Every structure is written in structure tokens, then in C-alpha cells.
């Protein structure tokens, strides 16, 4: 039986989640109330309440009116994706683009899968995809798609392998098309998902002729599970393979309805992921705030060559461009930003935290050098110390973030007719690039 959450069950899960939050953190009452309200809304909208109409008695006429489905719809203005779209690579998009998953349908992926004997949670074999114009083919494919989409990393269907794992290849007139597959199953899936399909020609070592194989990859775009939008009814004399509102999962080689334990794990994963996204959002705000403090120095290095430094430092407006912050004030600001990150540290993955610390140390060292130079009335390249010697500690720190070739190019600068130009903006952008890659994986639920 599928798992249907009632209002009382949602309240119980919500109260338990709030209790855990209050035990771990000491938020002020206003913050706690707003976060509790958001958590309750998230729990209620993630696992929507589904109502099934009672079975029709034998001998009665079917009602022409469609049964009413009591389904709590997704939020629009305060939805998950819109709240965190400012951290996405494409603003407003719910997740990464389809090209982010291209490795799952590559030639290397299908070469590895066709040699496996047996089906598992994340892959399935089919001798043929079938005619998508037939209802039975569409419903069976939608059932597998619903289950694969609820896996954390999605699932793959390999077409051209028989039930005894014999590699027979695709039929002569069979075509694997992403658009046709999506059109066949999308009306059965309530939720945003990715489907990618490709064909590859393989020649096995023990076979003389080449054969075509198909591969289909399915994955949901957000951490929220997908539900069945319609009944998987093939014929009226047989029960449907799944019903509207069902949550399907993979267990071994089978696509089955989720039980209460499976739903509990999905619910926990969704709540934990939302906390993680909030923590990432706070971390990125700290990165932006720290870089804002460096904006004056960043502009000067972007527009000045090294031969212009000495003349520019004598201008009366030079100290104002660097800013009036003292070293002690700058240290206090850095401590405040680090405290904000430490408060959300339990929800930040170690890889992201290490990347943030290196990026913050790189920018912080540049800021302290700018303040010292302003006070001493000098202005040298950001790659040098105050006495003009190379800043080897800064280079060593940057070498842990940047590729060797990119670091050498930024360090050498660009020779122009009036001197060497070493812009600072590309260097900081490069240090933040690795940070954004980890954030992108977190937002898509891959980390």
C-alpha cells in the first residue's frame, strides 16, 4: 500500500523536527517562529495529501465527473527553487541544466553497464523499449521512471540487453529519442525531472559485428520526491500498476510503492537538504560581503599598470579609494563573518568549508596588505610584499585553489605599452570558481 500522510502525521513530524532544532540551536523567538513556519510549510508541501475515491460498486454506472483529488499544491512565490535561485548557475532554474548529466549517457557509461549480469537499484535492462504509442509501454516506462527519479543520483535504463543478460542490441527500426520518451511519461509524473537518451554502437570482444544499444537516464531536478500524477491504468479489468499520489522507489530490480520507512527517509533527506541550502546561502552572503570590502583595491588593480602606481599613490584621494578601515576594524569584521559561517557549520559539507576557508584567507591577506600600504603611503602589485619582494605565502595559498598554469598567468600579468597590468578581479573570480562548483552540486542534491 502506498504511504499517505495525514494532517496529524505531518504535525507530528513537524514538531519532532522543531524540537531537534531547538535542542541544537538557541535561535531568538522571532527567528524560531519564522523558521518553524517555513519548516511546517515545507513538510506539508513536500509530501502532499492525496485522496483516493472509493471503488465503484458492481452494477452501477460510472460517474462522468472526475473524482476530486485533495492535493496540496506546490508554493509559487515562496517555493524552494525561487528562494534559492540566487545561488544557481542559471537564475530561476530549479536545478542544473541537462548537460550536467551527460556523463550518465556517455559511451563509457554504457560500456560498463552492458557487462553487468543482474539489475540493481540504479540500473535496469530492457530488450526493447517498445512502441511508445501503446498504453502498456508508456505505463510500465513511467513506473520505472517514477522509481528512478526518487533515487538520490537517478537511475539508468539500458536498452538492448535481454532478460537473460544476452546482448542482443536494438531492433533495426528502433530509435531512442529523448523527446518521445519524455512526452510518453511526463503526464504520469508530478514533479520536475530530467530525462536523457542516447544511442551507441558497440563491438564486443567475443562478437564480430557491431550492435546498437540505447541508454536512458532519469533523475529529479530537486531534492523533493516526485509523485504519480495519474493512475497507471493499462486495462479496466486489471488493477493499475500505481495510483495517483503514490511515491515509487527502487528496491533491487523492482520498482515498488514506498512504505512508511522509505517515506520517512525521503522526508528526512528533504528537511536536511533545506537546512543545508540555507547554510550555503548564508556562507555565500559572507563571501560577497568580504569581497565588497575589497572593492576599492580591486578597481585600482584592474585599471592601473605597475608603472602608474607611484604617481597614483601621491594623489589626495588615494586613501579614500582604499577605504578608512583600520587593521583592528578589519579583523573584527572578519571575525563577525566567520562567526556567521560557524553558526551554520553543522550543515556545510567539509569540502565546501575547506574551499571557503582558503578563499577567505586569500582575500583577507590582500585586504590587510592594502590597509598597510595605505597607511605607509605606498602602492605595489598585489603579488608583492610591501618592500617589493614576491609574496610567496600568498602564492602558496593560491596554489591550493588555482591550477598551476592559471596561477602563473595571473602572477605574470599582461605586458602592455605602459607597463605590466595585473588585474585582481580575475584572480578572485578564479578562487571563487571552485566554491561555486561545490555549491552547484549541493543545490542539485548531489552532495
Image: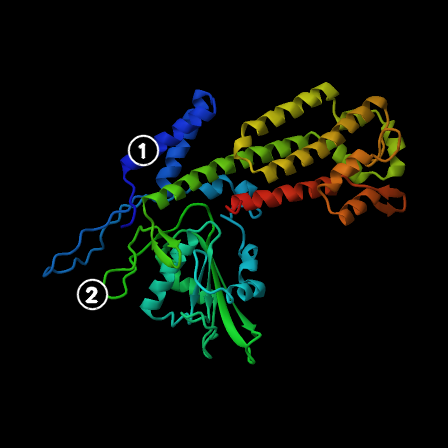
Q: How many marks?
A: 2
Q: Position of residue 144 (x, y in %)?
A: 39, 59
The residue tagged with tag 2: helix, strand or loop? loop
Contact flag, marks 2 and 1 (Cβ < 8 Å): no
Nearer to me, 423 or 311:
423
Position of residue 395 relative to residue 185, above or below, is above
How many C-alpha atoms fall within 10 Å of the one at disc 1: few (<14), some, or many (≥20)?
Answer: some
Residue 76 placement: quadrant: top left
Residue occupying the point 81% across, 41% down: 422
Q: Is residue 305 left or right of residue 111?
A: right
Q: Position of residue 248 (x, y in %)?
A: 35, 53
Residue occupying the point 78% across, 35% down: 394
Is residue 332 at least partly visible in the picture?
A: yes
Nearer to me, 395 or 177:
395
Q: Is residue 87 left or right of residue 243?
A: right
Residue occupying the point 50% across, 46% down: 445
Distance, label 2 to label 1, CA atoms, is 39 Å
How many C-alpha atoms fall within 10 Å of the one at disc 2: few (<14), some, or many (≥20)?
Answer: few
Check disc 1 and report the residue beneath it: 11
Residue 109 placement: quadrant: bottom right
Q: Position of residue 420 (x, y in %)?
A: 87, 43
Q: Is residue 384 left or right of residue 439?
A: right
* Label drawn at residue 281: none
Structure colour scheme: rainbow
Residue 429 placement: quadrant: top right
Is residue 326 at least partly visible in the picture?
A: no
| Residue closest to the far left | 59
The residue tagged with tag 1: helix, strand or loop? helix
Residue occupying the point 27% across, 35% down: 8
Check disc 2 and report the residue beneath it: 237
Position of residue 223 relative to residue 279, above or below, is below
Chain-order first, disc 2 or disc 1: 1
Amino acid at each position: 500500500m502506498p504511504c499517505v500522510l495525514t494532517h496529524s502525521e505531518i504535525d507530528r513530524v513537524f514538531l519532532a523536527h522543531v524540537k531537534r532544532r531547538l535542542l541544537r540551536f538557541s535561535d531568538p523567538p522571532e527567528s524560531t517562529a519564522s523558521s518553524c513556519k517555513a519548516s511546517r510549510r515545507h513538510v506539508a508541501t513536500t509530501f502532499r495529501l492525496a485522496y483516493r475515491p472509493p471503488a465503484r460498486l458492481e452494477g452501477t454506472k460510472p460517474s462522468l465527473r472526475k473524482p476530486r483529488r485533495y492535493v496540496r499544491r506546490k508554493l509559487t512565490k515562496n517555493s524552494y527553487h525561487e528562494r534559492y535561485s540566487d545561488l544557481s548557475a542559471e537564475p530561476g532554474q530549479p536545478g542544473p541544466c541537462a548537460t550536467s548529466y551527460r556523463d550518465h549517457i556517455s559511451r563509457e557509461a554504457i560500456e560498463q553497464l552492458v557487462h553487468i549480469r543482474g539489475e540493481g537499484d540504479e540500473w535496469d535492462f530492457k530488450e526493447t523499449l517498445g512502441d511508445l504509442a501503446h498504453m502498456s509501454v508508456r505505463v510500465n516506462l513511467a513506473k520505472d521512471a517514477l522509481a528512478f527519479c526518487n533515487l538520490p543520483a537517478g537511475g539508468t535504463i539500458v536498452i538492448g540487453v535481454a532478460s537473460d543478460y544476452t546482448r542482443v542490441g536494438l531492433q533495426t527500426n528502433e530509435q531512442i529519442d529523448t523527446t518521445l520518451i519524455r512526452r510518453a511519461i511526463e503526464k504520469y509524473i508530478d514533479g520536475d525531472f530530467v530525462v536523457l537518451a542516447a544511442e551507441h554502437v558497440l563491438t564486443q570482444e567475443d562478437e564480430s559485428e557491431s550492435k546498437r544499444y540505447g541508454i536512458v537516464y532519469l533523475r529529479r531536478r530537486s531534492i523533493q520526491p516526485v509523485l504519480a500524477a495519474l493512475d497507471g491504468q493499462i486495462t479496466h479489468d486489471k488493477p493499475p500498476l500505481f495510483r495517483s499520489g503514490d511515491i515509487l522507489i527502487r528496491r533491487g530490480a523492482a520498482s515498488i510503492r514506498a512504505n512508511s520507512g522509505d517515506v520517512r527517509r525521503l522526508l528526512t533527506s528533504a528537511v536536511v537538504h533545506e537546512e543545508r541550502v540555507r547554510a550555503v546561502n548564508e556562507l555565500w552572503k559572507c563571501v560577497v560581503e568580504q569581497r565588497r570590502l575589497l572593492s576599492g583595491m580591486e578597481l585600482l588593480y584592474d585599471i592601473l599598470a605597475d608603472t602608474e602606481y607611484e604617481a597614483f599613490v601621491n594623489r589626495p584621494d588615494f586613501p579614500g579609494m582604499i577605504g578608512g578601515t583600520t587593521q583592528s576594524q578589519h579583523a573584527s569584521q572578519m571575525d563577525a563573518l566567520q562567526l556567521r559561517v560557524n553558526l551554520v557549520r553543522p550543515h556545510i559539507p567539509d569540502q565546501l568549508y575547506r574551499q571557503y576557508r582558503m578563499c577567505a584567507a586569500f582575500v583577507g591577506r590582500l585586504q590587510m596588505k592594502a590597509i598597510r600600504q595605505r597607511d605607509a603611503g605606498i602602492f605595489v602589485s598585489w603579488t608583492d610584499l610591501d618592500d617589493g619582494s614576491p609574496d610567496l605565502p600568498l602564492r602558496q595559498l593560491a596554489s591550493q585553489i588555482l591550477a598551476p598554469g592559471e596561477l602563473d598567468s595571473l602572477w605574470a600579468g599582461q605586458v602592455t605599452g605602459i607597463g605590466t597590468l595585473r588585474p585582481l578581479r580575475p584572480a578572485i573570480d578564479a578562487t571563487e570558481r571552485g566554491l561555486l562548483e561545490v555549491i552547484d552540486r549541493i543545490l542539485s542534491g548531489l552532495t
